[in-house]
Amino acid sequence: MLAQILVSGVTAGAVYALVALGFVVLHRGTRVVHFGLGDQLTLSAYIVVIGQVFLGLPFAAAILLSLLLSAGFGVLIERGVMRPLRGSPLLVMIIATLAIGAAVREGLRASMGPLPWPVPFLLSPAPFTLGGLVLVPANLAVVGVALAVMLALFAMLRWTRFGRAIVAVYENPTGAAIVGISVPGVHARLWGLSSVLAAVAGILMAPLITLSPDMGTIGIKGFAAAILGGFNSLPGAIAGGFLLGIVETGAGVYVSTAMKDIVSYALLIGCVLLLPRGLFGTAEARKV
Amino acid sequence: MSASLVVEDLGIRFGGLVALDAVSMRVAPGSIHAVIGPNGAGKTTLLNLVTGLYRPTTGRVALGEETITGLPPHRIAARGVARTFQNTELFAELSARENVLVGLHRHLRYGIAAATLRLPGYRRAEREAARRAERLLALVGLREQAETAAGDLALGQQRRLELARALATRPRLLMLDEPAAGLRASEADELIGVLRRLRDELGLTLVLIDHVMRVVMGVSERITVLNHGRKLAEGTPEEVRRNPAVVAAYLGGAPHDA
């Protein structure tokens, strides 16, 4: 039973981990918590549907279109909203992200209707049994894609010029600027990157739950996972995501399915109260 | 390779506080120019204005023929201005080698596709960067510490690492904020040798802030003295040493010699 919970929890966990990464990747560089990330995730899934149903694109092309537009939308938020707000209090920027989220959500409700749309699975949703465990190909595909995206992210940060500039800004924006790295340019990249991570999560998640304008509420799960991981650690965000997915599934099995959502909020509150640095966060010494 | 630095009527105010008030100075290409003054005189503010970390309220900064006033710091860096900081601004969790590699950032040119596919262009650029990083670490005597996180280095080593990172950007003008602070006399003499080599072998123009008179008097061709955000005096070390206003304001009776 425990093994089954682990297997099932990992699917949701992989998606939470991607969303959590989206929060942390952006926050570490810009200090902004993007509360519209969940709604961007919904938008990306809708773009896949629009590409397929209305433009007649093949599934793969629709996904590519969605990822490109998501990255572009992220960069647009930085250029169009965050850059003009530079110098205003952080709270103003965070409230702006709430407004962006609401605009996306209500725009989708107005244009696409409140009813759910079907989104194709990556692999068959028909379960099979292996060694006493019930496995679902579609869920395995979610985990596989999510892990591949995470690996690609870490490789990019470690081995490319693009990624090294991001890490430099994470570590010390002044030091980065003084050696010729454009900090606003890196911020734009981070908005794009965070949006793409959310888009992947949205496209993976949409077939498993129903695609409606309110799907973005799973952004809160990603937020809770990021808090669990300390909110400034990339590996922490991933661990937080998987942990949340597994604990949630366990609560659903042992207590009741109604408990599932309560668990993430309870973990979120408990973590903020008892472990303000999360499980993996490091103390932040900020220079004054 | 080297460039002159011209500062004209440069000033900045923070609210009611005038941190720097109409300061002008001219640094000849390939020379070593010191800026001295008591604490709070505006020396670091001057460096922050030249490197673009602050935007001036008044005045002009020019590198060679080109005006760079008010440009963002990364654009000023791209024109060949590098600096170190009094309390170092390193990437603490990255290794010494990685810190220098970030300094080489501007000189690494390859697309993200080339990096993803590990094309020959990418590998050649990365190999060349690794070699340059190796040489720069050896130059500042940190070859043994290449894999140590910058934050774990001793303070003196951090200063030298920051110098290596600054040199990695291939500057024409290098500005150093208190490189001699806390050095022993023998180390200060070593620093004088290093500064002369940077000027003579790399052809750099050097601007140096320091309190350690042994270094300032020993190495600079000209000295600008700031006091309360204003320029108090300027001249050769001999002229500055004899200037009564400087003696009264700064050298006083107790020189800050190491």
Image (cartoon, rainbow, N blue to C red):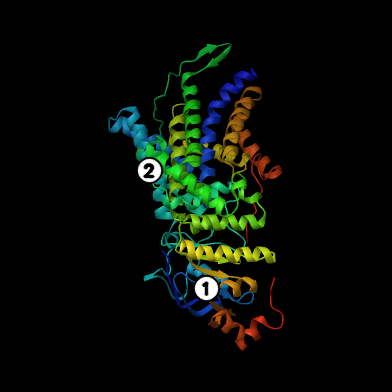
Q: Does residue B184 lie above or below B40 as drawn? A: above
Q: Which chain carries label 2?
A: B
Give residue A123's quadrant in the image. Answer: top left
Check the picture and name the quadrant holding the C terminus of chain B: bottom right
Q: Which of A288 and B223 is in front in this view?
A: B223
Sooner in the amino-acid sequence: mark 2 or mark 1: 1
Which residue sits at x=40%, y=54%? Answer: A79
Residue B234 image position (x, y, % from top left):
53, 82
Label 1: element kind: strand
- Bin the neighbour count of mark 1 within 10 Å (Cα to Cα): few under 14, some 14-19, many 20 and up: many
Label 2: element kind: loop
Give residue A238's quadrant in the image. Answer: top right
Q: Which chain carries label 1?
A: B
Residue A6 image position (x, y, % from top left):
60, 23
Q: Nearer the viewer, residue B215 or A58?
A: B215
Q: Does residue A246 lie above or below A232 as drawn? A: above
The residue identified by callout 1 is: B33
At label 2, which amino acid type do we have? Gly
The residue identified by callout 2 is: B111
Q: Is residue B210 visible?
A: yes
C-alpha gap between disc 2 and disc 1: 40 Å
Q: Nearer the viewer, residue B125 or A209?
A: B125
- Bin the neighbour count of mark 2 within 10 Å (Cα to Cα): few under 14, some 14-19, many 20 and up: some
Determine if marks 2 and 1 fall on one subunit.
yes
Q: Which of B234 and A160 is in front in this view?
A: B234
Check the picture and name the quadrant holding the N terminus of chain B: bottom left
Q: Is residue B182 left or right of residue A249?
A: right
Give residue B29's quadrant in the image. Answer: bottom left
